[in-house]
Image (spheres, rainbow, N blue to C red):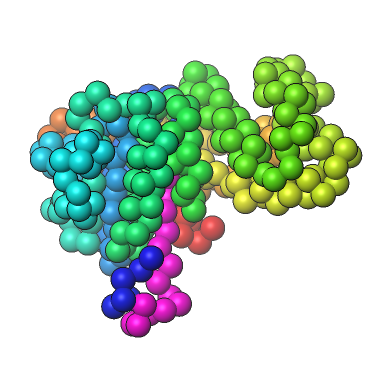
Amino acid sequence: MMNNEMDTEAPLQHTKKIWAVGGGKGGVGKSLVSANVAICLALMGNKVVAVDLDLGGANLHTCLGLPIPQMTLSDYVSKKITNFEDLLVSTPIQNLKIISGAQDELGMANLKHMHKNQIIRKLTELDADYILFDLGAGTAFNTIDFFITADKGILVVLPEPTSIENTYRFIKSVFYRRLKMVEGVAEIEPMILESMNAKITSGAQSSPADLIKKISEINPEVGLRVKAEMAQFRPNLIINQVRSQADIDIGYSIQSICRRYFGIEMTFPGYLDYDQSVWQSVRKRKPLLIEYPNSKLVNNFDRIVHRLIEY
Ligand SMILES: Nc1ncnc2c1ncn2[C@@H]1O[C@H](COP(=O)(O)OP(=O)(O)OP(=O)(O)O)[C@@H](O)[C@H]1O
Ligand SMILES: [Mg+2]
């Protein structure tokens, strides 16, 4: 719920947007993207909160040039602090605040269902124009749920086979999680399981797109619901560490494979060049876009953020 002041001042215009940054593999640039997209949005005058949901391996603060925050989500879960807003930490960038992930053993897998729902509710209640979720690697149930909660899902991929495979695995996890949320699909559970376990290389016969067709034949009403749910699933792809046109083209082929295999449309707002300034800024513990204003990545991020706002 919004606070009273906003309710009276701008009842309709204030639409908070949650963007989640994920991708199956570790080290692909999720935190880099979360931090710098957040910076771009803040520099444009938006009130932004970046949330480190990489519980167990939190490092978003480093990408934003901050020391390890004193209060983290873990302190909220353990009830060391009770006021969620006390977790907000200011950054050197105006309009941008951060909520840090845990520095201890609180992994995504250990986050209880109740805590997760409570955190999601508190996050959606924050006073901000944009909220960025920096997710951890992997396809833990909770990570997928945070991804699904967002209005926009962003997937960071490296032009490498392992990263691409992990991206498909991530999309597949989100696909079936969303599918299970559709009312009436429980009765066709065995069919879903069969499709879920099929390999992506085993051809179209057992693809998720094919499953949707089958569901529609068996029960047109449920089929329509499934189609509507999947039409809402429109992940945005960012190819990171690009060194050639061939690397950029991988984005288009992932798009077309997702259309054919999953029957879902993906948008491709852009790519990020491989650039020395990234690890240099990490080493200096300074935000990239602020420390290296002449880096190629400034234009890369500018284009991506403008497209993400448009889509
Ligand atoms: N465009 C780039 N050019 C050069 N180096 C890059 C680029 N993007 C990422 N890197 C390197 O990869 C490292 C990992 O990036 P980052 O921490 O953002 O990944 P991550 O996906 O958040 O990782 P994790 O899964 O561990 O949270 C960076 O510290 C940097 O050294
Ligand atoms: Mg990270």
Number of marks present in the image shown = 0
Q: Bounds of the magenta span?
A: 7-21
Find residue 84 and report its horizontal and vertical position in percent. 23, 51
Which residue ends up furthest to the right in the rendered image? 217
Find residue 161 and report its horizontal and vertical position in percent. 52, 19
Is residue 242 a member of the stretch shown in magenta? no
Residue occupying the point 15% across, 30% down = 283
Q: Is residue 293 above or below residue 157?
A: below
Which residue ends up furthest to the bottom in the rendered image? 8
Camera-side residue of 75 and 174? 75
Q: Quadrant of residue 183?
A: top right
Q: Is residue 72 above or below residue 170?
A: below
Residue occupying the point 50% across, 61% down = 310
Q: In which quadrant will I find the N terminus?
A: bottom left
Residue 60 in view here: no
Find residue 311 and report its horizontal and vertical position in percent. 54, 58
Residue occupying the point 82% across, 24% down = 205
Find residue 288 and report its horizontal and vertical position in percent. 23, 43
Is residue 14 a member of the stretch shown in magenta? yes
Left or right of residue 5: residue 256: right
Q: Is residue 102 above or below residue 90?
A: above
Q: Is residue 180 above or below residue 163?
A: below
Left or right of residue 107: residue 201: right
Residue occupying the point 62% across, 42% down = 181
Residue 102 in view here: yes
Camera-side residue of 2 and 268? 2
